[in-house]
Amino acid sequence: MIVGEPTRGAAHPRKGWTVHPHLEVTVPTGRAVNPVSGTNWEGTGVQPDIPCTAAESLDQAHALALARLAG
């Protein structure tokens, strides 16, 4: 179970090159693909099962764990 905020959605590994002291080029060098769906999470991120803010996520996960242990 994922608790918190959606991830940023960076599924493609990248390589960067400095072409000028004030300019860098970044190019995708690969692509992650889910073998079941044939898609990936680039640009959409991984969506949490229990959405909440990052600041609330530890307390929320802790409460869920305690509730599961209590039965």
Image: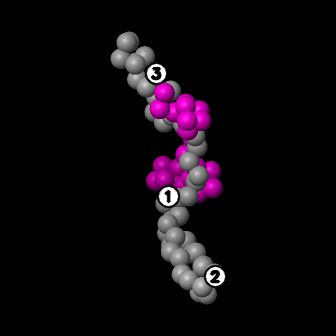
Q: Which residue is mark 1?
A: 33
Residue type of the residue flagged with mark 1 = Val
Q: In whole angstroms, how far apart are the C-alphas of marks 1 and 2?
A: 34 Å
Q: Position of residue 46 (x, y in %)?
A: 55, 46
Q: Which residue is mark 3?
A: 63
Q: In whole angstroms, how far apart are the C-alphas of marks 3 and 1?
A: 34 Å
As drawn, the residue found furthest toward the front would be 21
Q: Is residue 45 left or right of residue 32?
A: right
Q: Which is nearer the eye, 40 or 36? A: 40
Q: Position of residue 66 (x, y in %)?
A: 40, 19
For marks 3 and 1 on the same chain, the one whose residue lies earlier in the sequence? 1
Q: Which is nearer the eye, 60 or 1? A: 60
Residue type of the residue flagged with mark 2 = His
Decide if residue 39 is in sight here.
Answer: no
Query: Counting other residues with Cα less than 10 Å from the Cα at mark 2, is it few (<14), some (14-19), or many (20 or more)?
Result: few
Residue type of the residue flagged with mark 3 = Ala
As drawn, the residue found furthest toward the top would be 71
| Callout 1: SS | loop
| Callout 3: SS | helix
Q: Which mark is residue 42?
A: none
Decide if residue 47 is in sight here.
Answer: yes
Q: Which mark is residue 22?
A: 2
Q: Position of residue 21 (x, y in %)?
A: 60, 85
Query: Comparing marks 2 and 3, which lies closer to the viewer?
Result: 2
Is 36 rendered above or below residue 58? Answer: below
Residue name at image x 55 percent, y 71 percent: 28
For marks 1 and 2 on the same chain, the one whose residue lies earlier in the sequence? 2
Q: In whole angstroms, how far apart are the C-alphas of marks 2 and 3?
A: 48 Å
Magenta residues? 33-59
Q: Is residue 56 left or right of residue 23?
A: left
For marks 2 and 3 on the same chain, the one whose residue lies earlier in the sequence? 2
